[in-house]
Each structure stands twice: as structure tokens, then as C-alpha cells.
Image (cartoon, rainbow, N blue to C red):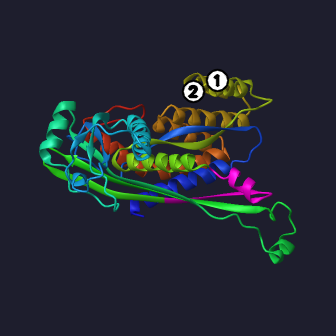
Amino acid sequence: MNKQLSIIAGFLLAVTLLAGCAGTSGMKEVQVDTLIPAEVILPSSIDKLLIVDRTVYTGNPFDSNEAIPTNAVPGEANDAVQLFLIYFFRYLGGSPRFESVVATEMLTGNSLNREFPRPIPWAIVNDLCRRYQADALVAIEVYSSDFNVSNPRRPSSAQQSILDDPQQSQFSVRGAGNVIFGFRVYHPDTETIIDEELYRHDETWNATGPDPAQAAVNLIRREQAIGELIHLAAAEYARKIAPVYVPVARKYFGESRNAPAMVTGSQLAEEGKWQEAADTWEAGISQAPEREAGQLAYNVAIAYEALRNPDLAREWAEKASVEYGNGQAKAYLAELDGQRSLLERAKEQLRGSGGVQLPGVQIQ
């Protein structure tokens, strides 16, 4: 794992721990979006990405290296790649960095040995980019998946005597799945491949049942397992090449006997009316006891993060922590400060793209 991915993983783990440790009664949980930077910084001249399926295998091993335009008959592999394209397009669409479009044309290229074919000829890359008015081409060039199910097993008599648990003595079965994708990003202006990755992810699923047949029935289906892995692959590669918003769990105060604004604002938040919730909580601070005033100020900070305004979120978290001594706000403020380096990197990437303006993300 490279340094940036380690930082992001650490940040997301810290967020999870923060949400899980907030254990104060009367708190509610919400998913808010936070902006993380891309791992690979594409040239600032690239504003529009063309996404192309190059995984069609014609049965002729020579075709796999030639990137021949084709109208393939949908099959399992083709359906899987189409599912990937849906997820990938959706994740890129959530990034403020790029506009993206999926080509209707498909190209031959998927190899049987799970290796990259020869690069797409630049004449084809240039023609497709001109046709779609795109600045770069993202090609899915390799796809493979597998899902195997083990034979149902039952704990040995010795294990059962140790466990002494009827549930644990049931038959168990395991499914092991994996997907492999090959990605390339072509830059026609410089005629260079600016990113190439052979992505692989393995996962296992377990199920139990009173007999072998029921254990197998309870196990995840192949289509669902592969679908989950495809979804993960789309999310991870989108995050690699584009700054994107990722959901994180936050908690806010939703109940109070001494601050009616707490409850009113909470109802607005549950309806997704975060600006109205922030205004309601802020208005209630002056009329609330000190403890509840700190909770209200903390809630305002959460509201502004939900509104994708990290600067105001930090301002209100500091107010809740320093002026009112709110413990949740203190931990939350430390989390926001830890997130700042990632946000600054994402802002720099947006700045390089020509100044996409976001609430609370000032592009100079």
C-alpha cells in the first residue's frame, strides 16, 4: 500500500472509531461526504474522460491485440463489464474534477491469460476522443472473475465438545471469489499511457446450515458475490484517478429536555434539510444552558460538513470545543485537522483543473 493510500485508510479508520466511540445517549448517526484526493494526478488539461470497454474476446487470439471495433453479443463477461461501467461512471460523476462519458463502441482486447494486450493504436484513440470531444481515454482492457464453493464441513467431535454450542456445530461452507481488471488511461495530446493497473481483489464469504444443502443455500450467490467485487473495483479505480467524495459516519445530538431547538433541528436533519437544521441549532444556542449550547454548536459543525463546507464545520467545531468545552467537538476537531492534508491535496487537484468551485473549498 502506498503512502497516500495508507493516509486515506488511516483517516477512514479514525472516522469509524470516532463514530463508534461517541456513545452518548440521544445521539443519531448520519453519513456525510468528505473529499479525498486522487492517487494519480492526471494532467490539468484533461477535463473530459471517455470510458471504453476493450474486453471483447472474439475467440481469435490475434484479435485481442488489435483493438478492433465490434458489436459483441452480450454474455456473462460482457454483462459484468457493463455493470462495472455503470458503477465507474456513477463514481466519476460524483467527482467535481471530470466530466465523463461512456463510448457506445466496444473494442476487442480481453486476453485469456489475464495480461494486457498491446496498447490501442493512437489512430483509434485520437478518433474516439475527437468523436466524443474527450481529452483522455480510460480503457477497461482485461476482465476475469472466479467464484468457488468449498464442500460443506462440520466441526470435528473434539471441536464440538470444546464449543458446546449447537449453532457452532452446524455445517459450514465457504465461497471464494476474485475479480481481475486491467485499466489504462491514454492521453492523446502527448500520445502516452499515463496510468496502467492490473487490479485484483479476492474475498471470501461464509455460511452455515443444519445440513449441507441448507448451508449451500445460505451462501451468497455467485452473481451477487461477483457484483460486489465489481462495485468495489469501480469505486477504487475512480478514487485512484479522480478526487471523489466518500461517505463517512458522523453522530450528532438529537434529543434534549432543555433545548427544544435540538429536537427541531434534528427533525430537519433527518429530512435532509441541513441548512435549515444548522440555522435552527445556531438560533437555539443563546437560549440553551451551557452544556446544551455546546451540543448545539457541535451539531452546527456536523451540519456544515453535511453541506460539504469543511471550513465552516471546523469553525463551529472549534467554537463548541473551546467556548463550551464539548468533548465530542474536541475529538471531532482533531479529526477535521487530520483530514486537512487530504483536503488540501484534493483542492490542489481541483485548482489544477481550472477552478471548480465547491462550498467551503476556495480555489485560488
Residue 25, position in %: x, y? Answer: 77, 42
* Vertical comparison of 351 with 153: above or below: above
Question: In the rendered image, which quarter is residue 50 located in?
Answer: top left
Q: Position of residue 256 (x, y in %)?
A: 77, 31
| Residue positioned most to the front | 59
Whether residue 338 is situated above or below residue 30 in the rendered picture: below
> Tag 2: residue type?
Trp
**Residue at figure coordinates x 64%, y 47% from the top left:** 19
242 or 184, which is in the foreground? 184
Q: Quadrant of the C terminus?
A: top left
Q: CA distance from mark 2 to mark 1?
A: 7 Å
Quarter of the rendering containing residue 257:
top right
Residue farthest along the bottom direction in this orientation: 158
Near mark 1 (Cα within 10 A), the count class, few <14, some 14-19 or many ≥20, is some
* Numbered disc total: 2
Residue 40 makes an appearance in the image: no
Q: Which residue is mark 2?
A: 274
Which residue does the image show at 45% across and 61% down from the upper left? 6
Q: Is 210 contained in the magenta span? A: yes
Residue 173 picture quarter? bottom right
Q: Amino acid at mark 1?
A: Leu
Residue under circle 1?
268
Q: Residue at the spot x=13%, y=46% of the render?
A: 122
Please report the bounds of the magenta region as a residue range. Answer: 202-220
Q: Position of residue 209 (x, y in %)?
A: 77, 56
User: Contact, CB < 8 Å: mark 2 with mark 1?
Assistant: yes
**Mark 2 or mark 1: which comes first in sequence?**
1
Identify the secondary structure beneath mark 1.
helix
- State yes or no: residue 13 in magenta: no
**Residue 232 vs residue 290, the one in the foreground:** 232
Frontmost residue, 32 versus 279: 32
